[in-house]
Image (tube, rainbow, N blue to C red):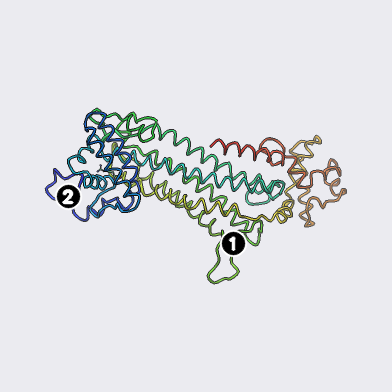
Amino acid sequence: NEGKLWGGRFAGGPSPELEALSRSTHFDWRLGLYDIAGSHAHAKALGAAGLLTAADEAEIHRGLDVLAQRFTDGSLQPAEFDEDVHGALERLLLEEVGAEIGGRLRAGRSRNDQIATLFRCYLLDHAETIAGQVLDLVDALTGQARSHLGAIMPGRTHLQHAQPVLLSHHLLAHAWPLLRDVDRLKDWRQRVIASSPYGSGALAGQTLGLDPELVAAELGFTGSIANSIDGTAARDFVAEFAFVCAQIGVDVSRIAEEVILWSTKEFDFAKLHDSWSTGSSIMPQKKNPDISELARGKAGRLIGNLSGLLATLKALPLAYNRDLQEDKEPVFDSVDTLEVLLPAFTGQVATLTFNTARMAELAPQGFSLATDIAEWLVKQGTPFRIAHEVAGECVQVCEAQDKELADLTDEEFAAINPALTPAVREVLTVEGSVASRDGRGGTAPVRVAEQLDEVAAVVSGH
Ligand code: ARG
């Protein structure tokens, strides 16, 4: 049992098959620097409790610094026989400072409270990276919204023409959910940072008089966890993080789907920049929205990571179970996925060219101003139920003659209903329609301009 953290009670070493199954260094090695930071903090707690002399503690800090240096330059690697990052780093520390001093460090801690703490530290850092990347995407969306204020597009429900809206209003409708995702990461952070599990030991706490608050403060937490079983067994912080990642993926996929549609010949609403689109190996003319397609695909993967993790956690009895080792790969994958996807997606959005003339041409088509006729009638005193019928009849007449609402003659309007005087034409332009939706949250240019400022205020608050 050379180099193992356990072995005293075993007559023989583990079988190679068990070792192969048990090993986690190929994915948990990325926690190395967090493990070392935890060890520094734990050494301080041992020193403060009188369990390490000042000289031994200094030697341990020195040894850990050497390991961190070698970890960073890539020369520190786990061995084939190392079970996990914790065991490997303890073995390497012993090599550096000797078994006598290095062997004192494990007192009062368990891999169970170590991993619960390190995983929090890792996710706290990456939550910040991801939040920054999401804000960059929000920036790209608001940049496009700002430079196209006034452009009108067909707003859709059920993917059918519904009512004209400002392109900027539509783009900002993608920005708000992303801002809520950043907010979710912030909320999550408040909870996670308040409860460092170090000091929980294997599950029941420790007998050595170590101060968990000291370790918590060293590692940047605002407090230590109140219940040692909870500290070692809970993974809701991982699941919640995985949920926010999945939600970001879903939010991005909805933009992605529209970019894919908009860049088709049929829509022709937007053109992809050459540097942010791909070609075909056989069809010379192709320009493909691969970034958006990958975004759409990766949303499925992010959802899978969340549901796989929840399935691992379901009905797991307290406290630590080895099943919990399965919590890391899916969430590492979510982190890696988003950190590579978001910058590419942001670049694609920032460099889209919108065909605003095409959008403007289509905006009034498909009878998208029928609601405006009904609401105009309401303002003239007609009950909405009747106004809805009358506007519907206008659509029917147009459809029979294959023309748009604005093409109806004064006589045709009057024949449909006498309340439809020529003055109704004031609402039969998309500009008039959009401008009239001027309540808070509406698509009128004045409101959208305010909304841009509101987004900017939220962004600068993050
Ligand atoms: N590698 C484990 C994990 O990722 C931590 C070690 C706990 N192992 C144990 N036998 N108690 O969850």
Residue 351 picture location, percent across and down: 61, 55
- Type of the residue with mark 1: Asp
Quarter of the render that holds ligand 1 = top left
Residue lying at the far right of the rendered structure: 411
Residue beneath disc 2: 2
Q: Residues within 10 Å of mark 2 (few under 14, many from 20)?
A: few
Question: Helix, strand or loop at disc 1?
Answer: helix
Closer-to-camera residue (196/443): 196
The reply to whether dot 2 and dot 1 touch (C-beta < 8 Å) is: no
Q: Which residue is mark 1?
A: 274
Mark linked to residue 27:
none
Relative height, residue 403 to residue 169 (above, below) = below
Pinpoint residue 205: horizontal percent, then vertical percent. Answer: 26, 31
Query: Looking at the picture, how far across and down is residue 16, in whole percent?
Result: 20, 56
If you read the primary sequence from the N terminus, does the residue marked by circle 2 or circle 1 appear first?
2
Residue 101 occupies which quadrant of the picture? top left
Element marked by disc 2: loop
Return the residue nearer the eye: 50 or 455: 50
Residue at 61%, 44% in the rendered image = 173
Tell me if 459 is positioned left or right of 25 in this view: right
Give the residue displayed 69% in from the left and 42% down from the top.
443
Q: CA distance from mark 2 to mark 1?
A: 57 Å
Give the mark count. 2
Residue at 76% from the left image edge and 54% from the top image edge: 399
